Amino acid sequence: MARSYQKYNQAFEKVHSSFENIFLIENNEDLNKIHFCFKKKYTNEDYARIYKENLDSYEKHANISIIEADYKRILNKVVDLSEKK
Amino acid sequence: MDSSQSQNKKTVNSTSHLPDIDNYVAPLVHENYKTVSRKLEVILKLFKTKIDEKSAIIFNKDEEISIKDESFQNIKRSCQYEDLLEQGKNYNFIVDALSFHHRQTDTSEHQQKTPKQNIDKKLFKNLLSTVNDKGMVMFVMDFHFLIQVPEVLKEFIVDEKESNVNILTRVYVIEKLPLVGVLTIQKFEKSHSDFDSLKLLTYEMYEDYSITKPVSYLLTLLKKSLTYMYEMFQYQGYLNTLTPGNVVKISVRENFWSDNVDYTITVVDSNDPELTKRRTCVAIIVAKSYANDFIYLTLEGNMQLCQQVQAARIILIRPNAFNYATVNEIQDRISHYISLFRNADSSNSQTPIMLMSDNKNESYEVYRENSFLVRDIIENEKKETFRQLIFNDHESETQSEVKLFLTTKSKAKSDPEHYTILPTIQKYKEKHLVSCLDQNFICSFYIKTVLTGIFFINSEKNFPDKNLEVLILGAGIGTINFFFNRIFGSKVNITAVELDKKMPEIGEKYFGFKNSQLENCKWHIGDAKEFLLESSKNKENEKKYDMVISDINNFDPSEGISPPPIFFNEDILNSVQVI
């Protein structure tokens, strides 16, 4: 959660330069009002594919029904982190 | 309705066509604040502990200051501030900026007509340069002065960038119409602060003398807040008198800098001359489920409503954000807006508040400690109960939430795997029911999103032969742990790090998270920074985790970011890379 853009940018730059795969969830007070994004290690299409593959793979061994309904909603919000800079 | 009335009908959705606030925020000197003494009395009331022999008052007119309070007797005072600046460093300055304006408006007829004055940048800069480390400058000012502050601060900060000065600002609005306020600026040298550069902290003080939570500001946010305040004053000025047939829609944000609209307020002035004559004002809180009803949504419906409640003006308030606020809480929060938007000549001294509530939610306290509260919220419409953890310092934010269901004690006890009995509120106990955790319902979208993060990791790993390894920093009461475990069962190993040992206990006792019982979840009570640094030194932990979740709360809102900035330091990030 960020209120200070300056602090956010500083943190963002540091995290961005340290990791190749980041799943960043941004929110402000209301935990139901969020948007989130990725560092661009893969293309968005790749991420969609990975997400689907994982979902299929985990589904056999896990009880994903409680989050499954949100899958498309979440995927639609994935953006490239570089777009946030 | 006759033709003259229909011509009057107008809906105002933004301030773009409203008059400038000059007409009513000016003149710059309010009756109550004409004398320096009166202004100082107000400051005394606000900052009693700050006024001492180290305070110096600067004003720009000759006037005997007569204040009975003893604390004023030893204060340095001068209308020629240069000599004070020379002695400067030891003082906290109180500046009657209004008196500086006053002199200018007195000297020019033209300026009297156009009362906007530029801030005295030289005075501003001189004072901030002179004042000592941790020293404070207080300006008594009006809105024209206030709204220029971000720009002037920006210039000042550019000048001072090399010395890395940090600034703390607070804005106190002490008189709303016309607006008189006190801006305090406190200076910090680098040596006394961990701040990287500029820091602005503002107490929003919109109502007289009542302080709300501190909110961290950057210049842009301060500017945004001031713009918002300006708009509110535009509305207030416009709505000061009744305009028959007018409807004004206003988006209200509790946090001035935020984009979240907390209330939509519609101010409706009746087009019935008889009602207009009566000048009565009534406020109506409209629950979400009624918000789209004809009577609230349409102009015609609004006019009908005026007839129904026999009011010249109705203020319709639709709360957007406080899903779980009780009616009393909503009333407390909106009373300020009612006083802001009622007609000044209202015939009733107090505005009655009517409730068009669906009585959707009831709130029951389950457990309270100094720093937090566990409560049950019953949504009457859906007959659903939610249990929430609220930190007392952040009452508008729900930290954790689960859904509960009710059953009989005997049934719950017969199947402990599926029924986790939780402390139950009296209302249900009386019905011989117990509250149980709904293990298949995740309340917040945030938690769901955190959990789905695992699906974005490239699955070159050997799942399911090898378990998923998840590290949670700032695990709190264990919401993420619990639902990770619900999803992946024995296929996930979780390491949960939490600073406060009470949190997992609360999670276990009041939320049913079984924190001490889950074999594949290890709790580490301690500082997450130390945990990361220690773990990264151990070779066994190299590339151990498939996913590291950072959900650390920052209890200091003035830092402007959560987790605290220290978690973005190089050594911490490097340690995360290692593990």
Image (tube, rainbow, N blue to C red):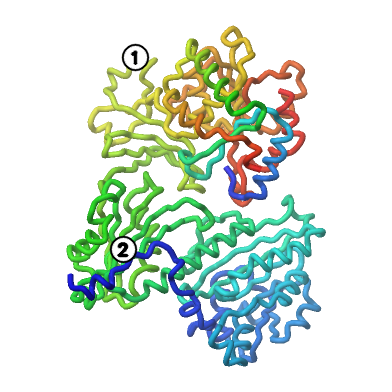
Q: Say which of marks 1 and 2 sits in front.
A: 2
**SS label for mark 2:** strand
Looking at the figure, which quarter contains the N terminus of chain B? bottom left
From the viewer's perspective, is A16 left or right of B140?
right
Q: Residue at x 27, y 33 (%)?
A: B428
Q: Is residue B502 visible?
A: no
From the viewer's perspective, is A38 left or right of B401?
right
From the viewer's perspective, is B39 left or right of B270?
right
From the viewer's perspective, is B363 left or right of B27?
left
Residue B101 occupies which quadrant of the picture? Answer: bottom right
Residue B2 occupies which quadrant of the picture? Answer: bottom left
Q: Are marks 1 and 2 in contact (CB under 8 Å)?
A: no
Q: Chain of mark 2?
A: B
Alpha carbon separation for disc pair 1 and 2: 53 Å
Q: Residue at x 51, y 72 (%)?
A: B174
**SS label for mark 1:** loop
Decide which of B565, B455 is in the foreground and name it: B455
Q: Residue at x 29, y 50 (%)?
A: B287
**Badge 2 amino acid:** Ile
Looking at the figure, which quarter contains the C terminus of chain B? top right
User: Where residue B427 sits: x, y (%)?
Assistant: 27, 36
Q: Which residue is mark 2?
A: B315
